[in-house]
Each structure stands twice: as C-alpha cells, then as structure tokens.
Image (spheres, helix red, strand yellow):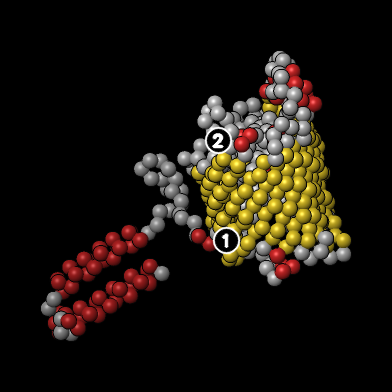
Amino acid sequence: MRNTRTRWFLSVAMTGWFFATGGVASAATATDDVSSELRELKERVKALEEREKPADVGTENGHGHRLHPIHSRGEAEISGDLTLVGQGVSSDQLADPATGTTGDAMEGTLSLDLFFEHQVSAQGLVLVQMDVQQGAGLTIVPVFAAPNGNTTGPNNDVESFDSSQIHLDQAYYEHRWLDDRLVIEVGQYDPTMHFDTNTFANTERSQFLANLFVNNPTIEFGGTDNFYGLGAVVMAKPVEWVDLVAGAMEGNGDYLETFTRPWSMVEADFKATWGERRGTYRVYAWQNRSHHTNGGGFNLLAGWQDRKNHGIGVNFDQELTEHVGVWGRYGTQDSRVASFDRSLTAGIQLGGGAFGRPHDALGVGYGLTMIGDEYEAAQAALGSPEFSGNEGYWETYYRYVIDGDAEIRGVSLSPDVQYITNAGGDRSLDPIVVYGLRLQAFF
C-alpha cells in the first residue's frame, strides 16, 4: 500500500511540474533543475515512510526491552464494576466508654474492579483484575471470624488491604481443551469464583451483602485475607450433568511455603432438571495446611499447637417456578482452630418478572453460625461464660434495576436490612439491626 501511494505521489508531482514549466520544450532547458527537485522529492517521501514504519517484532529499544506491536482492541476485553455501600447501626450495647465509641455509626464504602482479558490464542487467554477500595465499613458489629479473618459481617465488599492503593487481585493464564470440557488456570486467582458458587447467593454486588450469604463461612479459603493467592485450578466436564473442580494455592497469601503449606479443595457439581426447572447440587471437601496455633488464637491455655484446618460442605440452588428459586449451604470446620465449627444458611429469591420488572429481585436469607465447643470452653475459662450462643442472621434486600440488566451491564439500587442475634456467640447482646443502601454499576 505504501509503495502504491509513493508512486502516485511521484507521478502527480512530476505531472504538475511538467505543465508548470511550459511543456516538452521547456523541459529540455531545465534538466538540471528537474534532477535536483526529483532527488529532493524522493528524500522527503523516504523520510515520510520511515516515520510511518512500525517497529518490527523482536527488535529492541535502547534499554534492551523487546518491542511488540500494540494489540488490536478487538482482541481484548475490558470490563468492571463500581460498588457504593452505605450502612448504619444503632445499639447502646455497642458503645465503649473507654474509647469514647458510641453505639451509633453510619459508614460508607466504595470499591472499583477492573478486568482486562486478552485472548492470546484460540484456546488460551490472560486475565488481570485490579481493585481499589475506600472505606472500612462498619467495624463495631462483633460478629464471628474464621482463622483466615473471614467474618459473618454485614458487608462482603469490604477488603482488608490498604484502601489508598490499587491492588492486584488476579493475574492468571487460562487454557481450554476438548471444546471447553477441560480448563486449567495457573497464576494468582480467586477461589471463590470457582468453589461454593450459587445462582441465588453468590455476589455482594447484586445479591446478599452479608459475608455468610456469599460464601460458606466455614470454608477457610487460602491466599490472602481476601482469598487471592498463587496456585492452579482445574475444571472438567466428563458428562453434561457433572462438573468437577480441583484447586490448590499458597496457604496464607505471603508466597512462603507455597508447596509445603498449601490450601486445596475439590468439588463436584451435579446439574438437575425437574421438568423445566433447573438446579445445581454441590458437594466439596477442603484442607488448609497453613500454621494454626494456640487453639486458633482464642485458647491461651492451649500452648503451642501447629494444626491444619479442614472441612466438608454441601450447597444447592433450585428453581421452583419461573420466578422463584431457593438455595442453601451447610459446612463444617475444625473446632480446635476456629471459634465456630458449623454454619447453615438458606434463602429464597423472588424474581421481578412476577410483577413486571424482569431484572429486579427480592432476596431473603437466614444463617445460623454455631459456636465451637473449644471456643466456648476457652471463653468460660477466661471468665466470659456469655459466649455460649449460636449467631443468628437475617438479611433482606430488594434490587431495583435502573438501567440494563444490572448483572453484566447497567445500574441498580438496593435497600438492605440485616438482623443479628447473639452476635459473635455473645448471648448477652440484644439483637442488632444493620440498615443499608447499595448503588451498583456494571460496565
């Protein structure tokens, strides 16, 4: 294309010069001038082509870095979401005169997720997720916490990292074989994207906000406090109605003892169809071999103990009608290293299509987090016999879609109410009410 453009440019230039100098007769008397001007034109065209010429793949710049052409935007996908949550609580029992903290609090949080996905081949892609968060949310609600810091708290969108920085959540390579029946991911990934998922209770961005309704709190996921870690996950579909998932990652997110103290999990998902109604039933087992000491940190009389944590669980979601679905989870973990050892959650979702709003949804969930025997005995020995109850948790939300579908693209607004009894296993506390409002935008 460039050669054709160059020849055309030279032809036009020569023709214009020819007529401007008076034809053939004048040309004979100006041979020297023609040669000079042609040389000048050729030099200018050559300089123009050199400026337009891209760097070849494989060449190096002055710093020794290999140069690559910029990928076409059509080969990459960029998506993201913005989440704003405001929550409040009012309880005289949460006041702390020693620190001047009152029992009334209203807090706001903001988070932004960006996903960059590039298809590097017909079967392989690279995904990078960046995240930034502002605000710590409500910190005065005394709920249960697992050994990895996962709580039954009111806002699963709150991350534990420094909110003033941009953070790398995921960065992995994914490869697919056999018409996507076998998939492997290697790199830093989020295990909650693959394990213990649920159609009706799986994301704080468009469904329940409380932590225990997004993932089973008895699963001590590996990786950082936010469950991002180095490892690999393999997904297989041997038959249409069964999915198998197996994964492992570094145990506690510090990239130390990656292969000697890993977290690992296996899961089987069974797809069921009852007439026109679909459901998925999941069973799983997991193990976290990172260091668990001193009875999980709550039993000061236990002395030095180096244990691992492990557990099993089940999870299901099932459509009942065109607009109604139910879901549930149950899981266990080792009571010697955790303050609670069992969790049961269940709920129902009513789709807005039942009343002419197909993208809206109403969700109601209940959770019971059961105090561990070791934790209860340790608290009694320390003079706190009130820690002997099971934590009850209710949540109700309504997702009002303003634009789009509010799950992949669009905007939604969700009022949310949570009701907690025996928070953190403390029977002396009155019920706590947390009220909130969420604004969600997907792009």
Residue at the spot of label 2: 102
Tell me the quarter of the image containing the N terminus: bottom left
Looking at the image, residue 296 sits to the left or right of residue 270; the answer is: left
Res 88 → quadrant: top right
Residue drawn at 70 percent across, 65 percent down: 352
Tell me the quarter of the image containing the C terminus: bottom right
Residue 26 x %, y %: 14, 82
Q: Dot 1: few (<14), some (14–19), or many (≥20) neighbours within 10 Å?
A: many
Residue drawn at 67 percent across, 47 percent down: 418
Q: Earlier in the sequence, mark 1 or mark 2?
A: 2
Badge 2 element: loop
Q: Nearer the viewer, mark 1 or mark 2?
A: 2
Residue drawn at 65 percent across, 59 percent down: 399
The number of discs equals 2
Task: Give, as a three-letter code, the residue at label 2.
Answer: Thr
Residue 183 x %, y %: 71, 49
Task: Give, as a three-letter code, the residue at label 1.
Answer: Val
